[in-house]
Image: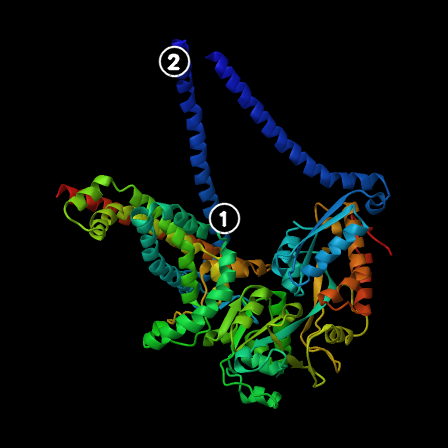
């Protein structure tokens, strides 16, 4: 009986890895293929635009897809600028809040409050982005216009960032809505990495007489920093690709302005707005593909930068330990 | 051990067979669904509609006529339960694209197709199916001007607002048109569509017709580059609902939307000066007047019509037809069987006759008689594999 089970186990063991290995390889190859097809479609679609506009597309500031006469004049800089600025605002607002939320949930929260607070934060991630957009347009935009922007203008109006007329639609509002949207992504990953900081780290720190805050600052955060950066990278990827909510509150104007109050556009918002109306204008369609390619490249570079930072920090931590 | 393996293998084989069978079955189902119509109509002369063979028709395009087209599909299906029509309101551009690529049976567009667009889709014809107007809306409640107050505009003033040349509500040019109103000293936020749209086409078509400067620097199109954006007081919003919502939420703003979107209480609706010199607000009658002002039956070979700035004492000047797109030789569309072609043509025939009675409830003006007869000529000239599709 015992033997029989063993031999059956052995039989399973001998077979399983094979099938399992095939399944895993298929999954891995499928991801490669999907990425390749994606990239191919983007490059293939943008060839005409790349040939016609050349590198000038990246620095051009005019966006005239249907001039009264002649071919379109298209430049991607306003969209790239808008994407960068709104993502930056979102990260500046969301990273500290996410970290705070994560620390609260992992370190400070009473047991009874913990599960509900995690549930509520993760519920934010389940809200569809178009709902955020509606809420943004009808609630956040008037609020920003009447309270936040006017106050910022009164106190910080000497900065070009907070200058100019404000009707609530613009980069700042888009950044705020993006921040709300990415907080659950940032905070869940951060919470997980904070939770796996070994008990011994905390205990050691507390044993040396650290307060709770000092313990978090000196042993928890440094230990978890690579994971925290990974969370920031994830949140950034989410923010830069967000389409619907941003489209509804950013004002959709191809313009580079220093003031955060003024309307602008982002790469995904341009594609979402204009993709349906490009029939019969091949160069215009191709330019939208090229915008997609640029977004792909930006996301890739940001991820790469995040990876490099993580490796550096890991290396540094290693050397810290040796020292 | 070998027993176990065999069992597993058998299970795997069964699974694979089921999957393959499902795929093959699904494939043949769809292929045959397209074919049976053709083989049948080749052997039998009875039409699909009279023989009650189930037909499924797919359309896509403009959002503006979508409520009406969808009403038609429902009503038509209750009359002729074997004809199912699905209309997918993905936008005019999407509709043009899909009918050009022949992935739908009919398209719909608010803007008449350009010659370049037509050359991409040989044999495509346009059939006006309804008409609507573009309302000028504003929100000045917080400046003490209620939404019931009608502000007068001229095409020239509208063009200058959207060019960023008139920036204040108390600009002399606007005050001159509204001597009885206390217009505030407030910045005008000019809201426009951020997505391509037939509404934008109608609006810029009108501005091009009345302002030569606009015509030469901006032009008319489903999406244009708005000069007012350069001043920082222009705002783009997605969809009619987006423009209406943004205007309602932005004190001192002006926008343009399809009439039905301005019907609520949250927006003011402006009057626009027509060619006769009267200030006219958009409603069913004034929009219908604009269409009726053009007399004589237009050439059914090319029904791309412009009714902006139409003549007539009570014609609203920013009105536009919206179009169904079909292939004149309907079998150009590969999945178009003879029975399907006939069902589609009969549906369109019904839409421009009996279907028009559903238009006023949804604030679309019924087609004038001259357009109905032009549409009739167009529909009777449709062919499928060289044969006339419908005769009556």
Image quadrant assignment for residue B355: bottom right
Point out the residue furthest to the left here: A323
Q: CA distance from mark 1 to mark 2?
A: 52 Å
User: x, y (%) of residue A269?
Assistant: 48, 60
- Camera-near label (1 vs 2) is 2
State the count of labels: 2
First in sequence: mark 1 or mark 2?
A: 2
Categorize mark 2 by other alpha carbons within 10 Å: few (<14), some (14-19), many (20+).
few
Query: Mark 1 highlights which residue?
Result: A41
Query: Mark 2 highlights which residue?
Result: A6
Q: Is B176 above or below relative to B338? A: below
The quadrant of the image that shows the C terminus of chain B is: bottom right
**Chain at tag 2:** A
Which sits in the foreground, A292 or B282? B282
In percent of the image, x 57 and y 88: which residue is there? B175
The answer to whether tags 1 and 2 share a subunit is yes
User: x, y (%) of residue A51?
Assistant: 46, 58
User: x, y (%) of residue B192?
Assistant: 55, 70
In percent of the image, x 66 and y 32: which residue is there? B25
Which sits in the foreground, B109 or B254? B254
At mark 1, the secondary structure is helix
**Chain at tag 1:** A
Left or right: where A217 falls relative to B305? left
């Amino acid at each position: 009986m015992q033997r029989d089970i063993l031999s059956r186990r052995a039989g399973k063991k001998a077979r399983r890895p094979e099938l399992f290995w095939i399944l895993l390889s298929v999954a891995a190859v499928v991801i490669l293929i999907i990425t390749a097809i994606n990239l191919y479609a983007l490059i293939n679609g943008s060839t005409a635009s790349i040939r016609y506009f050349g590198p000038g597309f990246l620095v051009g500031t005019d966006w005239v897809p249907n001039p009264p006469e002649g071919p379109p004049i298209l430049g991607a800089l306003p969209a790239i600028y808008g994407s960068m600025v709104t993502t930056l605002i979102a990260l500046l607002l969301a990273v500290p809040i996410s970290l705070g939320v994560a620390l609260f949930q992992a370190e400070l929260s009473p047991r009874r409050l913990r599960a509900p607070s995690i549930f509520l934060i993760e519920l934010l991630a389940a809200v569809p982005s178009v709902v955020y957009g509606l809420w943004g347009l009808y609630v956040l935009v008037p609020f920003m216009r009447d309270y936040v922007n006017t106050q910022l203008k009164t106190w910080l109006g000497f900065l070009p960032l907070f200058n100019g007329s404000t009707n609530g639609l613009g980069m700042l509002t888009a950044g705020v809505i993006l921040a709300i949207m990415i907080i659950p992504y940032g905070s869940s990953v951060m919470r997980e990495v904070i939770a796996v900081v070994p008990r011994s780290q905390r205990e050691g720190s507390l044993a040396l007489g650290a307060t709770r805050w000092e313990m978090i600052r000196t042993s928890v955060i440094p230990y978890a920093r690579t994971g925290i950066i990974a969370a920031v990278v994830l949140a950034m990827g989410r923010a830069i690709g967000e389409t619907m909510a941003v489209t509804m509150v950013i004002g959709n104007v191809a313009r580079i302005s220093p003031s955060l109050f003024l309307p602008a556009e982002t790469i995904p918002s341009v594609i979402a707005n204009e993709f349906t109306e490009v029939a019969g204008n091949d160069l215009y369609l191709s330019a939208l593909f090229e915008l997609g390619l640029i977004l792909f490249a930006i996301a890739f570079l940001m991820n790469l930068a995040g990876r490099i930072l993580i490796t550096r920090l890991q290396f540094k931590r290693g050397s810290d330990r040796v020292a | 051990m070998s027993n176990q393996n065999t069992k597993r293998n058998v299970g795997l084989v069964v699974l694979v067979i089921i999957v393959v069978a499902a795929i093959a079955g699904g494939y043949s189902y769809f292929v045959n669904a397209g074919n049976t119509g053709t083989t049948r109509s080749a052997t039998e002369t009875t039409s699909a509609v009279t023989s009650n063979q189930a037909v499924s028709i797919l359309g896509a395009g403009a959002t503006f006529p979508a409520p009406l087209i969808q009403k038609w599909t429902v009503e038509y299906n209750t009359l002729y339960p074997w004809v199912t029509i699905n209309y997918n309101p993905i936008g005019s551009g999407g509709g043009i694209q899909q009918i050009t690529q022949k992935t739908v049976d009919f398209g719909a567009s608010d803007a008449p197709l350009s010659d370049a667009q037509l050359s991409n889709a040989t044999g495509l014809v346009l059939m006006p199916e309804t008409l609507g107007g573009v309302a000028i809306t504003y929100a000045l409640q917080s400046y003490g001007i209620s939404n019931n107050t009608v502000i007068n505009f001229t095409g020239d003033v509208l063009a200058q607002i959207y060019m960023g040349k008139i920036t204040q509500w108390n600009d002399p040019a606007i005050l001159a048109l509204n001597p009885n109103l206390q217009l505030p000293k407030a910045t005008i936020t000019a809201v426009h569509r951020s997505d391509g749209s037939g509404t934008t086409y109608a609006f810029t078509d009108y501005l091009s017709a009345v302002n030569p400067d606009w015509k030469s620097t901006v032009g008319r199109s489903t999406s244009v580059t708005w000069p007012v954006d350069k001043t920082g007081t222009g705002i783009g919003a997605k969809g009619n609902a987006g423009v209406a919502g943004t205007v309602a939420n932005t004190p001192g703003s002006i926008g343009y939307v399809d009439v039905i979107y301005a019907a609520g209480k949250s927006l003011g609706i402006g009057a626009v000066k027509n060619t006769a010199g009267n200030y006219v607000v958009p409603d069913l009658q004034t929009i219908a007047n604009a269409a009726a002002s053009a007399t004589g039956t237009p050439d059914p070979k090319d029904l791309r019509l412009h009714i902006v700035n139409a003549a007539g004492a009570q014609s609203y000047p920013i009105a536009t037809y919206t179009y169904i797109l079909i292939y004149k030789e309907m079998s150009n569309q590969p999945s178009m069987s003879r029975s399907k072609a006939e069902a589609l043509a009969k549906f369109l025939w019904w839409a421009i006759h009996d279907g028009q009675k559903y238009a006023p409830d949804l604030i679309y003006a019924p087609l004038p008689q001259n357009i109905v007869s032009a549409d009739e000529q167009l529909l009777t000239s449709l062919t499928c594999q060289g044969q006339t599709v419908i005769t009556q």
